[in-house]
Image (spheres, helix red, strand yellow):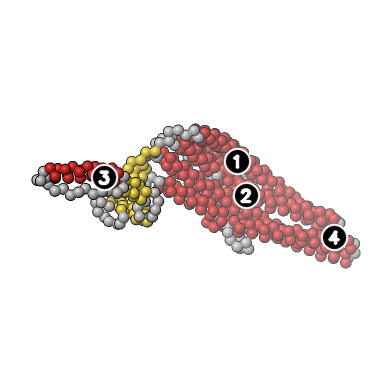
């Protein structure tokens, strides 16, 4: 939840201290958020975590399984039934009694003679047998799958927040790369303009030499200056290509894709109320929310390990057929319902697991405090860097103005033969360096703005 006062201050600050974001740059940011490969990887990790959550929820639903077995066997153990040993003495006595009674009484009924029985040996394995069943099973109570679902819910949230964290970092990287490219383009333009100055200086030196107002070394020095500026120009062009390639890399575009630049108004302002910015950062930054979900995971782990000592109750329903053949009749098919309880009465390893989860929670609490402190430090550092960059712009502008006037005066004196090449070169070099520092200061200020925006988590994705 964001507090209105702190948020209002932050919005007002960025409305005044940060130049209006151009539609061009915002379009590039949108392209990066859509195409960046690393962000796509983060999104895939989040999608995977959502599937893990669905898997955890699926454990609460019934499972239906089909099992079929048809077997043929021969040999193996036997089961002996001593039928002959048990019944033959009885049958012999009955036959003797019947014979004596028949001899003593002619009217005694005729009874068949009882046979002699053999002992029976039956194979333990049936020579042919089948069993086919359909089983439906579902948990009635299981603390483990309840806590497992909660763990997966929080882990999924951490992945989602991880995507948001990277998106903010990507916005900062795109802005930084954009301003670095603009800085490189301006540097190329600066040295191209400087090339015109040194070429003009060479022409002036050659004219003065032809009119015997300077010696030949002045011409050589002017030629050397051209080579020096050419080196600076080549280095600036190299930096421009590198900056262009990196910016397009972030957007997942071809490295040589042209980049449209718009000039932003730079308005360096001093900023106060550090506490408000730190408070805003700690409320907006997703890293703290992410740590809260990790802490919730450890709470669920504690409950999970404690829940392992609770009974698990499951319901199962079976329907199937058994016998030598597949017959659907009262002698072959069967239905069986079961309630199964499993209770781990003693497990000495469970208590250390609970303690490990508690220690992990304490570690995460310390990490959360450290992250809060780091966010505060990052915000204050970014704020001071922004303030310093604003001052650098003011100083660089004053220096450029002064050195530009100085160069014009020295150049005029040189044209009149009242100054030497060394003085002119020094004046031109100082002016070029000051102009380069002003370019750097202006774009560094915008980079510092992006860093402060990242530190406070105030970029609006809408």
Left-right relation of 409 to 287 = right
Q: Which residue is mark 3?
A: 88
Left-right relation of 205 to 97 = right
Give the x, y percent position of residue 462.
49, 51
The quarter of the picture where residue 368 lies is: top right
Q: Which residue is mark 4?
A: 221
> Cα distance, mark 4 to mark 3?
136 Å
Q: Residue at x 78, y 54 (%)?
A: 429
Residue 337, visible in the rendered structure: no
Asked if disc 2 and disc 4 are in contact, CB closer than 8 Å, the reply is no
Farthest bottom residue?
210
The quarter of the picture where residue 142 lies is: top left
Asked if disc 4 and disc 3 are in contact, CB closer than 8 Å, the reply is no
Farthest front residue?
103
> Mark 1, residues whose alpha carbon is within 10 Å: few (<14), some, or many (≥20)?
many
> Cα distance, mark 2 to mark 3?
111 Å
Q: Which residue is mark 1?
A: 379
Asked if disc 2 and disc 3 are in contact, CB closer than 8 Å, the reply is no
Of pointers 1 and 4, the one earlier in the residue sequence: 4
> Mark 2, residues whose alpha carbon is within 10 Å: few (<14), some, or many (≥20)?
many
Q: Nearer the viewer, residue 10 or 371?
A: 371
Of pointers 4 and 3, the one earlier in the residue sequence: 3
For mark 2, give the secondary structure. helix
Of pointers 1 and 3, the one earlier in the residue sequence: 3
Q: Which residue is mark 2?
A: 446
């Amino acid at each position: 939840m964001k507090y209105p006062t702190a948020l209002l201050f932050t919005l007002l600050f960025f409305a005044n201290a940060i130049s209006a974001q151009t539609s061009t740059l915002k379009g590039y940011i949108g392209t990066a958020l859509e195409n960046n490969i690393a962000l796509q990887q983060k999104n895939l990790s989040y999608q995977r975590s959502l599937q893990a959550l669905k898997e955890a929820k699926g454990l609460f639903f019934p499972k239906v399984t089909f099992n079929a077995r048809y077997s043929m066997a021969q040999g193996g153990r036997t089961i002996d039934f001593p039928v002959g040993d048990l019944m033959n003495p009885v049958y012999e006595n009955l036959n003797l009694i019947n014979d004596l009674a028949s001899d003593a009484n002619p009217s005694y009924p005729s009874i068949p003679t009882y046979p002699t029985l053999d002992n029976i040996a039956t194979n333990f394995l049936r020579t042919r047998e089948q069993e086919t069943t359909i089983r439906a099973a579902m948990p009635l109570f299981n603390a483990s799958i309840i806590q497992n679902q909660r763990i997966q819910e929080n882990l999924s949230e951490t992945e989602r927040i991880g995507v948001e964290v990277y998106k903010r970092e990507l916005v900062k990287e795109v802005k930084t790369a954009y301003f670095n490219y603009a800085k490189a383009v301006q540097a190329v333009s600066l040295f191209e303009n400087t090339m015109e100055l040194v070429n003009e200086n060479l022409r002036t030196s050659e004219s003065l030499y032809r009119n015997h107002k300077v010696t030949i070394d002045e011409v050589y020095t002017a030629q050397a200056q051209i080579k020096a500026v050419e080196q600076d120009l080549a280095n600036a062009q190299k930096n421009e290509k590198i900056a262009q390639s990196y910016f397009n890399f972030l957007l997942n575009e071809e490295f040589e894709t042209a980049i449209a630049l718009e000039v932003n108004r730079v308005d360096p302002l001093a900023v106060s109320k550090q506490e408000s910015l730190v408070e805003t950062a700690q409320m907006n930054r997703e890293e703290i929310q992410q740590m809260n979900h990790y802490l919730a995971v450890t709470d669920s782990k504690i409950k999970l390990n404690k829940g392992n000592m609770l009974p698990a109750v499951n319901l199962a329903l079976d329907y199937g057929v058994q016998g030598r053949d597949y017959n659907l009749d009262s002698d072959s098919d069967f239905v069986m319902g079961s309630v199964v309880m499993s209770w781990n009465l003693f497990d000495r390893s469970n208590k250390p697991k609970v303690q490990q989860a508690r220690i992990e929670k304490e570690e995460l609490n310390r990490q959360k405090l450290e992250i809060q402190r780091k966010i505060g430090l990052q915000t204050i550092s970014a704020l001071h860097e922004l303030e310093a960059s604003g001052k650098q712009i003011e100083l660089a502008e004053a220096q450029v103005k002064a050195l530009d006037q100085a160069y014009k005066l020295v150049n005029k004196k040189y044209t009149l033969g009242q100054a030497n090449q060394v003085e002119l070169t020094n004046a031109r070099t100082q002016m070029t360096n000051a102009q380069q520092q002003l370019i750097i200061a202006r774009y560094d200020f915008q980079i510092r703005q992006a860093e402060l925006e990242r530190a406070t988590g105030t970029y609006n994705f809408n």
